[in-house]
Every structure is written in structure tokens, then in C-alpha cells.
Image (cartoon, rainbow, N blue to C red):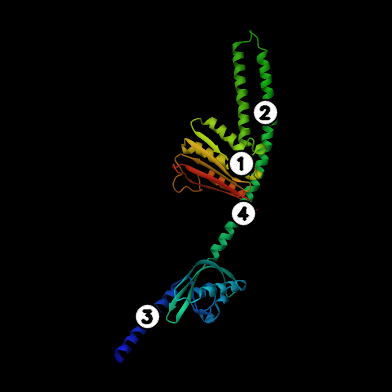
Amino acid sequence: MNTLAKASALRLKKTRQGREHDMLDAVLKLVPDAVISVDFAGHIKTFNPGAERIFGRSSASVQGAPVSLLMPERFRSDHQVAMQRFARPDGQARMMGLRRIKGLRADGQEIELEGLISHVKLPQGARLLVTLHDVTVRAQAEVQLQHSRAQLAELTRKLMTQERVLVKRLAQVLHDQLGQTLAAIRMCHETMVELQTAQTPPDWQHLQERMGTLIGQAIAQVRQVLQDLRPPLLEEQGLSVALDNELRNRALGAPRIDISINVPPKLELMRWPAEVEYAAFMVVREAVENALRHSGASAIAVDLSGNALSLHLSVIDNGVGLPEGVGLGVGHLGILGMRERAQAVGASVSYGRGQEPGTRVAFHWQCAS
């Protein structure tokens, strides 16, 4: 190639590079995120307008400065080590995945950033290109959300404690007072029936029979309320026995539905913290009730597993399954209640479609210590 051709090719190359540089410069000005190029020694070479806005610094003021200037002092050594490891030249482009880091504005305010680091080849040479997105507002919202969840969990714990105390007192009143009163009324009624003679008018005898029926119904209703309020056997014999008794009673009211419970022999007498057992029992009761009312299932199975430090319960039915996209909004307060009960004792509740398709509700608790 002659000298003229070489000069022409060189001018064309410079023109192309100039256009590419202008285009890159235009893109960097339009990008709202911070885009910073750094040499392998950690010095800032490019600082776009997005970076100026996020860090409150001008491009001129940071040219050649160490990139650690943009980080709080307590994090600088860690970031420098990470950058050095990433900057080892190996001839291949690499990228460090999205990560959350702390940034420092010129006014001393700390900000939350999400960033990517990658190797790039620029006309000026190889560089580390750092792109940063300001997520301070989102991070603050996340902290507030976590705080609100913690407050809600604490409130739920207190409400559950009050619920247990109130239920226990109400059960005692129903059993010790109203129950005894009904028992006394039944004894008086039976005595009146025994005192009847052949001369007792038929209308009177019919009224006595009717009264006996009503007294029996009232006693049965009080017993059912006691059963609903205070899980039978839960305090005395534990979760496994209480659930078995609960499901047997449910099966009596739904004879066409196969309701079963599977408990490994080693867990039949296992005890967990009282508040965990109570929450687990109430979650299973709610899940079974939902299945009986809404699933159209022919079979409902409860499986219990775990050990002294963990508890896992699942309620599975073979009904119609949950609608697509079911959430925790209006119309699904039962699900919301189950999750709040679980979270209050450090447990979790998950729910979803089964295999037939059916519905599966799972309660899981793990000892934190």
C-alpha cells in the first residue's frame, strides 16, 4: 500500500473512531445511571452526567481520583480488594454480577447502589466499566417494609396470646357455669318427667318431651362451642393427638369424604412449644375447613413430620384446586390469617396446587436457636 493510501486509511480510521467516540459520549450523557470507567490501578477516567447527579460531584473534580473516593470509608478496603481481584488482566472480557453496594455523595450522605462491573476495551485502552443505579429510595422502602412486618408479627403474637387467654377463660365459663346450669336443668326436667302420672294431660307430656329435646340440643351446642374454642387434648396430650381427634370429629360431619392423618410413630407423643402447636393446629383446622367448604374433594390428607427442633404439616386435598393467580387479597382472608398465625411464631405457610390438581397447604417451623 502506497503512502497516500495509508494516509487515507488512517484518516478514515480516525474519522470512524471520532464518530464512535461522539456516539458513545452522547449515550453516556443520556443514560440516567452512573457510568464510570476506571483503570486497573483504580483511578477514575470517565464520569458521566448520571454519575455527577448521583454522587453530587463534577466530572472534573474526580478525574484521576481513586474510585474509593465514592465509597464510605469503612467499606473502601473491601471494595478495593474486590476490584483488584476482578481487574487481573487475563485477556478475556469478564463481568461481575449485579450486587448491592454503599456509595458516598459529596455532601457525606450514604446512598444504596446496585452495580455491574465489566472489562471493556476503549480507544484509550482496557478499562473497568462500572454502572451504578441509585436504589436508595427502594432500600429505604425495604427497611420500612421489614419494620412493618416485624411490627405486624409482634402484634399478631400479642393477639394470639390474648386469644388463647380469652378462649381459655370463655371455655371455663361455658364449662363450669353454663354447662353446670344446663346439667341442673336436665336433672330437674328428668325429675319432672318421673313425677308425671297417667292423669298428666297429653299436651303437657308433649311439652315435656319437647323441652327435653331442647335441653339436649343446648348441651350438644355448648360442647361443640367448647370444641371449637379450645382444641381438645392440645394442652394435655399434644398436637398429634389433638389433630387426630379434630379430624375424627370432622369426618363424622362429612361421611362421604375420606379424611386421614399420617403421623410417624416417633412423633405421636412429640411436643413442640405451646404457641407453635397452637398456631399449627389452627392453620390445619382452617385449611381442612376450606377444603370441606370449597374444594369439592373426596379425600383430605394431613401429613405430619419433623423432629424436636422442626415441625412440618401439610394438608392435601384432591379437589378442584386453587384458581390461577390466587393471592392474598379480598376473598382469601383465610389464607392471610394462616400466614399471619405462622409468622407470629417464626413459622411459614405456603399454598399451591396439588397433583390431581387439588390444593396443598403446608406449615413449616424450624427452631431458631
Kind of residue indicated by mark 1: Lys
Residue on which disc 4 sits: 150
Quadrant location of the N terminus in the rendered image: bottom left
Instruction: For label 4, count other residues whose C-alpha is less than 10 Å away and answer few (under 14), some (14-19) or many (20+).
Output: some
Instruction: For label 1, count other residues whose C-alpha is less than 10 Å away and answer few (under 14), some (14-19) or many (20+).
Output: few
Q: In this view, does 364 lie above or below 208?
A: below
Residue visible at 54% across and 40% down in the picture: 302
Instruction: For label 3, count other residues whose C-alpha is less than 10 Å away and answer few (under 14), some (14-19) or many (20+).
Output: few
Q: Which mark is residue 179?
A: 2
Q: Are marks 1 and 3 in contact (CB under 8 Å)?
A: no
* Closer to the camera in the image, 91 or 45: 91
Tag in front: 4 or 1: 1
- Residue 48 % position (x, y): 48, 76
- Work out which residue is located at the far top of the displayed protein and give it: 199
- Residue 276 % position (x, y): 63, 45
Residue on which disc 3 sits: 19
Q: Is mark 1 on a helix, strand or loop?
A: helix
Q: Which numbered disc flags the more N-terminal residue, 1 or 3?
A: 3
* Closer to the camera in the image, 71 or 299: 299
Q: Is residue 296 above or below residue 369?
A: above
How far apart marks 3 and 4 lie (CA) works out to: 55 Å
How far apart marks 2 and 4 lie (CA) works out to: 41 Å
Residue on which disc 1 sits: 266
Kind of residue indicated by mark 2: Gly
Tag in front: 2 or 1: 1
Q: What element carries label 3?
A: helix
Q: Which numbered disc flags the more N-terminal residue, 2 or 4?
A: 4
